[in-house]
Every structure is written in C-alpha cells, then in structure tokens.
Image: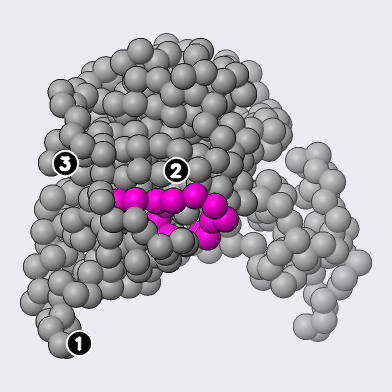
Amino acid sequence: MSDEAAESAPLALEASGIVKRFEGVHALENARLDVRPGEIHALLGENGAGKSTLIKVITGLYDADAGEIRVRGEKVEFDNVREANAAGIVALYQELSIIPTISVAENILLGEQTPSSGGVVQWGKLRKRAQEQLDKINKKIPLGKLGFELSPVQQTMVAFARALATDAKILILDEPTASLTDTEIVDLFTVLRGLRDQGVAILYVSHRLEEVFELCDRLTIMRNGQTIVTKDVADSHVDEVISTMVGRAADELFPARATSIGEPVMTVEGLTGRRVQDVSLQVHAGEVLGVGGLAGAGRSELLRILSGAQKHVHGTIAVGDEMLPHSPGVARALEAGVALVPEERRSQGVMLKASIQDNIAIANLPSVSTSGVVAGGRIIDIAKRGMQDLQIKARSPRQHVGELSGGNQQKVVLAKMLARKPRVLLMDEPTRGIDVGTKAEIYRLIRRLAEDGTAIIVVSSELPELIGMSDRIIIMHEGRISGEVPAEDADEEVLLAYCYGKTGK
C-alpha cells in the first residue's frame, strides 16, 4: 500500500487513553498506539515498559480500566482472544503454539477453521485450504509433516499461515526472530514485507533495534506504562531510540572499568572437550573476562565444562589453590564457588511455574534449611533481598516466574546464583532477548560484583557489548582461543578477525 493510501485510509488499529492497574500499580497510564493498514510498526520499550500489557488489552486478555480501542474506525470491546481474532487481530508470541503431534495442515486450520461435515473432518478441503494459506506467503512446507519435525522458521511460517486462515488484518509479532538464524531472518522479512504489501497491519515487538531500522515503517516507544513518542523510522536513529527508551544517553550504558585487578581466582590449563580444544586461561578477582566468537566456536561449551555441567577429556581446572576433580559435576563446582547463569534461562535457568522465592530457594537449600527442614521465613528473606538488590519488578516473591518479563526472569536466574556468593560467576549471553534498559542494569550489576572481588567470565555474541563491559577479551574459533586483547585496546575489526580464525595475542 502506498504512503498516501495508508495515511488516508482508516487506522487499522487505534488504542487511546489506555489505563491498566494491577493491585494499585499502574501498568499502563494513558497509553496510546495507532497502526496503519499496510505498515510494519515497531513497539519498543524496556521490559516492564507496558508493551505486553498493552498487547494483552488489545487482544482481549485483559480488560482496560479506562480508554478505548478502535479497529478500522469502529470502537470495540473484546471479552476474550476469540473475539479479537474474529475482528482480525491475531498475536503470535515468541513461544509459538505449534502442536507437535499433528500435521502442518491441521496446525494451520485448528479449531473452528477445520472443515468438517457432521463432525467428520473433510481432509481434502483441509489440505486445499491449508495450501492456500502457505501460497499467500509463498512457502513450500509439506502439509503432512508433523509439528515436531519443523525447523524454527517453518514453525513461524505455519503460525503465520494459521493467522491468515483466520483472515487476520492486524498481526502482532512478539520477538519473532528470537530462535532464527540470520538466513532465516532474511526469509522472514521477505514474508512480512509481502504481507505489508497485501495491506496487513503488522505490530512488531523486538529488542533488536537493527531489525527495526531495516524492516519497520514507524515506531512507538513506551516507558513506565506511558507512550513517549510515535514517529517515522526514517526520522530516527539508534542512539535517539535508546535514550528515549531508557531515559538516558546511549553512551551511559556501560559503567567504568575496574581500576585494579586481584589475584587469579580460576586457572584453566589445556582444557579439551567435545568442542573445546586445549584452552588455557586465568580470570582474576575483580576482573570481567569477556569471551567472544562465532556460533559453534565453543564458547558455551567452555562455560558448561567450567561449571561442571559438561564433562571434558583433558585438562585441569583450579579455583584458588583448590584443584577440582576431573569433570567435577555441578554440585562440586558450586561447592568450590563456581556458578553458571545459562543462556537458555526459560529451559535451564528457572522453573516457570514456580514462584520467585521457590526458584531462589531451591538453589540455596543450605541457606534456607536446618537439619533438612526448610524455614519459610528464610526463603522469603532471601527472595526479598534478591528482588531488592536486582530490582526485580514483580507483585511479590510469590509471583510465578513465567508471568515476568524476559528481563526480570533473567534477574531471577542471577538472584538464585548470587545468593550463593560465588567466587567465579559464569554468564552465558546474560543480556540476550532483553531490552537496553535492563541490559544497562545488568552491566552495572556485573561491575558491582567485580568491584566486590568476584571473578566473572561472560560470553556474548555482541562485540560492542564485549568491549563495553569487559576488562579483557578472549575470542574463540573452532574450539581454540584465537586472540586475546585488553578491552580498552579492542575494536570490532580486530575482534571480528579473531572470530574468523586470525590468531594473535
């Protein structure tokens, strides 16, 4: 749709004056949003800024306390998601609801969309209609393939096809590229541009600002439950967006580096495992050691071996003067003061259906129990302390972790590990999938822990992040250390050369 036609047509979606409170706390305060037909509109903000709450109000999951929603100029009130879907509004979340045990065709035409007669599925019509939806996005996926056999990008495309089967006119996408490779992202963007050209209004929620500037037409930024600005992407730049989201300049994200480094806390010699080859390193008290490299370089495997979560073939690991046994296991490594914050927080770091306090307590049973008897008061105390220290935004320590934003889930993982007061903290992609404001909080936390003498090893795929938060950086390539450089002397060009196998010290 042309710019002139889009501006003259009724707004696909308009939310104005939206207010939503939870237990007296304003989650939304006079929030507003408008999306035009045939545009891709970015919705940006820190975790806790109100994006998810606004989407849930728009899609009928929450009732607004005040304000109104209009779809194609008409005021609407949705009591549930089904009513929103019937009005053409479909939300696709990061965790796609693909049913693994049924076919692609059945996944596309679930529920009321399934053609049937007298309660009997009309399989020919089902396959024909499912193929029509895939054709709309120019995708060739075998209709008989089962859900669990699909790649992440195929799952995303099937979810899109399902949305189109419901005649979606407004598509809301929450972090759609989180599990996709760079090649798959290019493929996805082609599909989204095609849908935009067909007149579909797309609301795009992402923490990856480079995607926003490549893909989107306009953006809306929220902060503290309020809409701060809506403007054309062409009239914006990254630093301006970041400063508007967090309320401070982008160059203030990283705190100052350490002024002094202590004695070695962890010494690794000749470590070799499945994807790690002859790695030797030291990390000192008060030091942040950054680890970079391309996907598959062995970074995550290195941290898992150091934490005892993965066995190794050769090499030694010492914490202070204590030599750890070969492949010590997680419990033994924890006893020695080595704690890991894993990359996959939702599957490895937290129990989503358990409360914040239970998540923290289960990793710290010696601190909350006596003679095997757990003390409820101690659990609450340790949870409240963790929530306060890490500024976890939640209603109470009893709130389920699955109800929290991604950034606050990551803080719970940190809280449970920090309660153990580790000597060595291993962090694998600690800021992946969280907003820039929460990233800044984590950077400050990392620096504060280092100042208290903790030795920290951090894996990150983002070279600017490695440079900004580290004291020293090592780069891995095909399981080996290909380069090492003080962070103050590092630049992205040198680090990238090491990522691709150029060796140096």
Q: How many residues crowd around disc 1 within 10 Å: few (fewer than 14), some, or many (20 or more)?
A: few
Query: For numbered disc 1, what is the local secondary structure?
Result: loop
Earlier sequence position, callout 3 versus callout 2 = 2
Q: CA distance from mark 3 to mark 2?
A: 22 Å
Residue 356 versus residue 243: which sits nearer the camera? 356
Residue 193 visible from this viewpoint: yes
Rendering coords of residue 265 (x, y %):
26, 44
Q: Residue at x 50, y 46 (%)?
A: 271
Query: For numbered disc 3, what is the local secondary structure?
Result: loop
Query: For numbered disc 2, what is the local secondary structure?
Result: strand
Work out which residue is located at the far right of the displayed protein and give it.
Answer: 124
156 is higher (above) or lower (below) than 477: below
Let me know if residue 277 is in the magenta part.
no
Rendering coords of residue 213 (x, y %):
50, 21
Q: Residue at x 56, y 48 (%)?
A: 272
Residue 343 versus residue 22: which sits nearer the camera? 343
Q: Amino acid at mark 3?
A: Gly
Mark whose residue sits in front, 3 or 2: 2
Mark number, residue 453: 3
Rendering coords of residue 89 (x, y %):
54, 50
Q: Quadrant of the N terminus?
A: top right
490 is higher (above) or lower (below) than 114: above
Which segment is the magenta one? Answer: 306-319
Rendering coords of residue 228 (x, y %):
27, 28
In this picture, residue 4 sits left or right of residue 289? right
Earlier sequence position, callout 1 versus callout 3 = 1
Q: How many residues crowd around disc 3 within 10 Å: few (fewer than 14), some, or many (20 or more)?
A: some
- The residue under label 1 is 372
Q: Amino acid at mark 2?
A: Glu
42 is higher (above) or lower (below) than 79: above
Earlier sequence position, callout 2 versus callout 1 = 2
- The residue under label 2 is 269
